[in-house]
Amino acid sequence: MEVLEPLGLSVTAAARLLGVTRPALSALLNGRSALSPDMALRIEKAFGPRMDTLLRMQTAFEIAEARKREGEIKVERYVPKEETARS
């Protein structure tokens, strides 16, 4: 929403401009869905920011979110056993 207000666009108008449904754009803007390559390309075409920049920002966000949950993920490091000598 904060992104659209300076442009004078409602979510409905922006969705129409991007060729997506209002619920799809609303989910993205409210953090309920991730930015897809398709949506990033639509945003690039409509508003100018490069698709690759938008997707790098999305990836950085997802990495930060995963790091926040790092302590909840219980996985032990795999250490391969040495192979036995063949006769």
Image: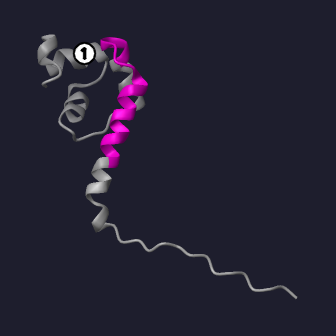
In this picture the colour scheme is one colour
* Residues in magenta, as a range: 44-63
**Residue 48 at what x, y percent from top left?**
34, 13
Amino acid type indicated by mark 1: Arg
In which quarter of the view is residue 80 placed? bottom right
- Tell me the quarter of the image containing the C terminus: bottom right
Q: Quadrant of the N terminus?
A: top left
Residue placed under numbered mark 1 in the picture: 16
Residue 51 left/right relative to 5: right
Residue at the spot x=39%, y=32% of the render? 55
Q: Position of residue 3 (x, y in %)?
A: 17, 22
Instruction: Please tell me whether residue 51 belongs to the stretch shown in magenta.
Output: yes
For the residue labelled by badge 1, is the local secondary structure a helix, a strand or a loop? helix
Q: Nearer the viewer, residue 31 or 79?
A: 79
Q: Relative to 19, does residue 26 appear above or below in the rendering?
A: below
Closest to the observer: 21 or 58?
58
Horizontal arrangement in the rendering, residue 60 relative to residue 27 (left or right): right
Give me the residue at 16% from left, 21% from top.
11
